[in-house]
Every structure is written in structure tokens, then in C-alpha cells.
């Protein structure tokens, strides 16, 4: 049984498929990453198959793609930039996880896709996932002619491609006078106090966000009026805390060293069941690079997920989530007068 969806943002569409296999995550991962096994169900790969490498995938019948591996976290996650002659700039995201005695494969392909490209990607990947199932079951892998594939799958994918579902996972950029407001959110399976500590304790911030100096303040302290400075791999930012309601809300100025003017960052926490909804609004942000700001916050909030799970996010994790969000966050263009 396969689950299909087409999701849309202001600028992109995402082909989404979910399927269970009667195999282990390790076996499924190897089927996605071993050149010998890939040849049997997906295509011939040549090049550098390591994280950061670039390879070529030949799927036969004149279909090929150039792939850049952004994140390779065996046996759970693979993120690649995908380019082919028809759709040059897309990103594919594979997640593999144990689900009882079976393995769940979640696959998304995101890019600036029109209806035809969306339908083609959806049908093509569904056919490949059928072939993967045959491989994992030890059966002969069936390569069907494309006209047979489309005849069988058009009734499923045509309606999805023409009427995609709105996808609200991604950051948004909204005009506000001469500047913009950037908003992002994420729900965590952690108590609000745990999330609050993770975003205010300098030691914990250093584990997932940046090296932060907050004038020796700690979680739960009266932080209003305190200054802070955060050092990232690509620069540094600084600000002053304007408002702080412990456990619930934090408002601070924010200015990168290379910027002439700053913005205001508003962070709010809200209990949701046994978890926590975290919302970020960056107000009075610059229009130049606004989509990069949004993608950066998405990647940061994803890194916080990893931290709250008790693991340490890597630079490659950030790059992978940034690449995914870049495909979805629309660049802001000021309307002509």
C-alpha cells in the first residue's frame, strides 16, 4: 500500500510518497545506496557516492540525472540536490525508519514543478518504489514501459497534480512596508521547559545553534536588557533582549555584523498536548536575502529537533534542511508602484 500526496507552497510543489516494506532499515538503506543493488531497480550510478560528492544516475531510455549528496546519515536519512534536463533544480529527501516489524520509507521530491512535471515525478517514483519492493522481496524486478506506467497511475496522480494540498511546514516571507516579516514554526515532542532551556541556556545553545555569550545569564534569570552575541560558522550576530517571560516568550533585537540595520526576533512557546509549539517571527527584516533568512530558521529549528532527541546536529544536517527550505521559501519582490 502506497500513500501519495502533492503538497504546494507559494513557489514549489512536493511529490510525497510513503510505503512500508517487509525488511529492515539497514537492508532498505543498502538498496538505496549500494551501486550493485541500485542498478537492479533504479539505475546505473557513477561518481562519488559519499556525503558532499556528485554522481550521475543513468535510469535508461535516455533518462539521467546529476546528483549532489548533501546529507547521508545511514541508515536513516539521505538528502540530495537533483538535476536533470527537464527539471534542473530540485531536492530529494529520503527518510527510512523502523515501524514495528516493517520499515517505513518516506520520500519527497521538491522543486519548481508544473503539473506535468509533478505528475511525471510522482508516477516515476511510484514505479521505482514498486521495483524496490520486488528487489527487497527477492523477486524478479519488473521494468514496465512508460506508457503502461502512466496508464495505471494517471488516475491517481492527475487529480493530485491539478489540486495539490497546501503545505504549511515551511517559513513564510510577508511584506511589511519597506521590510518583511519572516515566520517559522515547529512542534517538538518535548515539554515547554525543556525547549525553553534549549533556547536560552548558553551551554545548550552551543550544542545546536551557535556559540553564544549572554553576559553570564542563564535559563530562568531576569534577562531583559541583557546583550548577547552569537558566533556561527558563516558570521556573527548580536542583540539585546527587550522582553522575557520565562518559559513562554522572548523578544530580542537581531543584527548580523555585516548588516547596516537590524531586526526584531520574537520567539514564543505554546504547550501542545505533551509537546511544545515554537513560533519565530523576525520582524523588520531586510528584503535582500529574506528567503535565505527563512530557510536558515527552518534549518535551525530542525537542528533543535535533533538536539532535543539527545543527538548533536552536524553542519551537514543544517545544510540539508537549508537546501530543502530553499526550494520552498519564495523570494520577496516589492510590488511596483
Image (cartoon, rainbow, N blue to C red):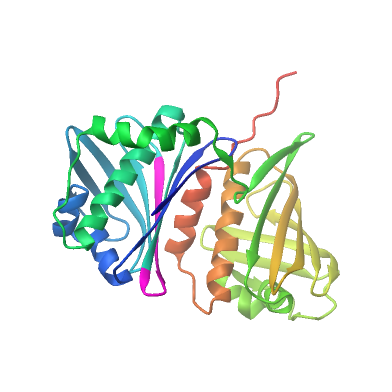
The stretch of residues the image draws in magenta is 90-102
Compared across the picture, whether 220 is left or right of 304 comes to right
Residue nearer the viewer, 103 or 287: 103
Name the residue rendered at 82%, 81% in the picture: 221
Q: Residue 329 in the image: state x and y as whole percent.
A: 58, 42
Above or below residue 62? Residue 29 is below
Rendered-image quadrant of the N terminus: bottom left
* 97 within the magenta span: yes
Name the residue rendered at 63%, 48% in the picture: 168
* 134 within the magenta span: no
Above or below residue 186? Residue 8 is above
Q: Residue 277 in the image: state x and y as whole percent.
A: 70, 64
Label count reads 0
Above or below residue 112? Residue 322 is below
Q: Residue 99 in the image: state x and y as whole percent.
A: 42, 71
- Residue 63: which quarter of the image? top left
Residue nearer the viewer, 316 or 272: 272
Name the residue rendered at 25%, 29% in the picture: 147
Compared across the picture, whether 327 is left or right of 52 comes to right
Amino acid at each position: 500500500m502506497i500513500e501519495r500526496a502533492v503538497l504546494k507552497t507559494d513557489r514549489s510543489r512536493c511529490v510525497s510518497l510513503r510505503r512500508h516494506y517487509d525488511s529492515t532499515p539497514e537492508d532498505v538503506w543498502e538498496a538505496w545506496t549500494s551501486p550493485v543493488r541500485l542498478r537492479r531497480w533504479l539505475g546505473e550510478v557513477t561518481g562519488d557516492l559519499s556525503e558532499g560528492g556528485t554522481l550521475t544516475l543513468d535510469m535508461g531510455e535516455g533518462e539521467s540525472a546529476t546528483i549532489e549528496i548533501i546529507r547521508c546519515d545511514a541508515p536513516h536519512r539521505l538528502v540530495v540536490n537533483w538535476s536533470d534536463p527537464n527539471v534542473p533544480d530540485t531536492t530529494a529527501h529520503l527518510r527510512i525508519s523502523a515501524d514495528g516489524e516493517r520499515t517505513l520509507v518516506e520520500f519527497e521530491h521538491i522543486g519548481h514543478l508544473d503539473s506535468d512535471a509533478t505528475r511525471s515525478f510522482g508516477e516515476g517514483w511510484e514505479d521505482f518504489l514498486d521495483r524496490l519492493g520486488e528487489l527487497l522481496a527477492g523477486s524478479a524486478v519488473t521494468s514496465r514501459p512508460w506508457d503502461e506506467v502512466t496508464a495505471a497511475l494517471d488516475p491517481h496522480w492527475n487529480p493530485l497534480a491539478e489540486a495539490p494540498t497546501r503545505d504549511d511546514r515551511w517559513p513564510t516571507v510577508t511584506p511589511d512596508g519597506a521590510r518583511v516579516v519572516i515566520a517559522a514554526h515547529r512542534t517538538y515532542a518535548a515539554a515547554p521547559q525543556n525547549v525553553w532551556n534549549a533556547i536560552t541556556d548558553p551551554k545548550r545553545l552551543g550544542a545546536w545553534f551557535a556559540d553564544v555569550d549572554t553576559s553570564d545569564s542563564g535559563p530562568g534569570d531576569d534577562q531583559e536588557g541583557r546583550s548577547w552575541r552569537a558566533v556561527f560558522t558563516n558570521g556573527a550576530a548580536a542583540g539585546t533582549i527587550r522582553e522575557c517571560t520565562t518559559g513562554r516568550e522572548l523578544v530580542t533585537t537581531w543584527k548580523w555584523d555585516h548588516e547596516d540595520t537590524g531586526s526584531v526576533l520574537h520567539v514564543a512557546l505554546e504547550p501542545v498536548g505533551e509537546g511544545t509549539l515554537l513560533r519565530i517571527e523576525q520582524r523588520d527584516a531586510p528584503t535582500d536575502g529574506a528567503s535565505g533568512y527563512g530557510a536558515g530558521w527552518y534549518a535551525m529549528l530542525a537542528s533543535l529537533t535533533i538536539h532535543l532527541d539527545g543527538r548533536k546536529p552536524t553542519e551537514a544536517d543544517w545544510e540539508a534542511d537549508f537546501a530543502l527550505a530553499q526550494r520552498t521559501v519564495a523570494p520577496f519582490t516589492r510590488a511596483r508602484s
